[in-house]
Amino acid sequence: MTENVRRVAAIRDGTVIDHIPAGRALLVLSMLGVGPKTHTPVSLVMNVSSPKHGQKDIIKIEDRELDQMELDRLALIAGQASVSIIRNFSLSEKRQVTMPDEFLGIMPCMSSNCISNSASEQIRPRLKVVTKSPVLIRCFYCERIQPVEDLIEAVT
Amino acid sequence: MTQGLASLEYVTEEWILEIVNLAERLSAVAAGEARCEAMRGRLLANLFFEASTRTRMSFEAAMKRLGGDVLNLNDLKSSSVSKGESLHDTILVADGYADVIVLRHPMEGAAVFSDDLSNAPVINGGDGSGRHPTQTLLDLATIQSAHGRLDVDIVIAGDLRYGRTVHSLARALSRFGARIILSSPNSLSMPDEVIIDIQNRGSSVEHVPELSEAVKEADVVYMTRIQRERFPDDDEYDRVAGTFRLMAKDLDDVRPDLIIMHPLPRVDEIEQSIDATRHARYFEQSANGVKVRMALLCTLLGIEPEVLT
């Protein structure tokens, strides 16, 4: 493990999210619902040097493994992040964060006049990723382009 | 994915041209000069959650000219919708009665959602300020009929921000390589997301704020109405709307085969004396709605129409 990751103690079981763009770790924690009511240990390292990205943030969460929905949301906030699942102090699994082709039921369309936001219907929101770089996301139903910063706010 | 027509984004350019060409073959039927029984025994359900005259009537005319019949849901006060029925349930009920459904709804994406649910194809008759694909098809048919091609130089003028017909039209024409010239007040300019789509498809977009200048380079001028309610006061409206009126004198130096289109209703954005010129096509454009919708109905229901004289 690198010097940066060792700034905090190794964890027995849990998840290490590395290569988060500097300053975005708090958004990631918010997206993961880490807050005052969280009782498992969480370590946060911000603005440490990174050969690839200049500066980066790192998060370690004990006793928790991220599910696919959380990985999809993470792609929106920190598309370059890497996710390591730790079991019994060893790296058990490495998951690369990748932008999905579609966000299904993960976050609502940002257009209030979209049918998927209608209170009288029960529609799972469906947002299609048109291009991944730059990120261009469009609602499947109303076809409106989704402002990415607004989507991030919706999931954090 | 689509079985109906929720959006032109889901169909190919070839499909669009087939509709346009079939519409041309059905011209005489639409005009009542030939018979066609392609829709005999078929029912169309018109589900209009918002007011419409032209779209609803032209679907009805198209269906009846083809020997079919129409069910209308347009009095929402007495329908189950006013009792809180969801669009989901309304569509499934209509699906049980009809072979094809036309939907106009105030929320964007309503037709995509409905077409996914229904066994009968759902045609989008306009959703919110979103899409209006059958208007676009008839616009394309009008251009194709006049110029024999769709890679035209077109000026789109007036309210480009809120007018759904111009968004659909600009997106569709960009797929055929049109040169798109936009002329509008700053406060009513084309939304960025439409411009991005046009440019992503390789069409060029130019902005020419002076309408009388823009028209000189056009094969098509597509006028739209600037609505008074978009402006904070009447003086501002009068000032802006006045500069986006097409006058007969503006046509002195235009291309001889220029056509002028308008989705109607018109207020005063095209001077009436232009109606009598060879350039005016807006009433023909409106009439084209029937044959285009006939072609669409035949195509979606998989019926090859036989025209009887």
Image (cartoon, rainbow, N blue to C red):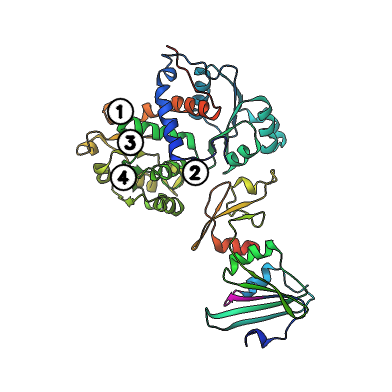
- Residue B9 bears which disc, if any? 2
**C-alpha distance separating marks 1 and 2:** 33 Å
Quick check: do tags 1 and 2 share a chain?
yes
> Residue B151 placed where, x, y %?
33, 41
In front: mark 1 or mark 2? 2
Query: Is any atom of residue B266 visible in this view?
Result: no
Q: Chain of mark 1?
A: B
Quarter the C terminus of chain A occupies = bottom right
Name the quadrant containing residue B25. Answer: top left
**Which secondary structure class fits the magenta region best?**
strand
Quick check: do tags 3 and 1 share a chain?
yes
* Magenta segment boundaries in residue numbering: A17-24
Residue beneath label 4, please? Answer: B243
User: Between B62 and A54, which is closer to the camera in this rendering?
Assistant: A54
Q: Earlier in the sequence, mark 2 or mark 4?
A: 2
Secondary element at image label 4:
helix
Q: Chain of mark 4?
A: B
Secondary element at image label 2:
helix
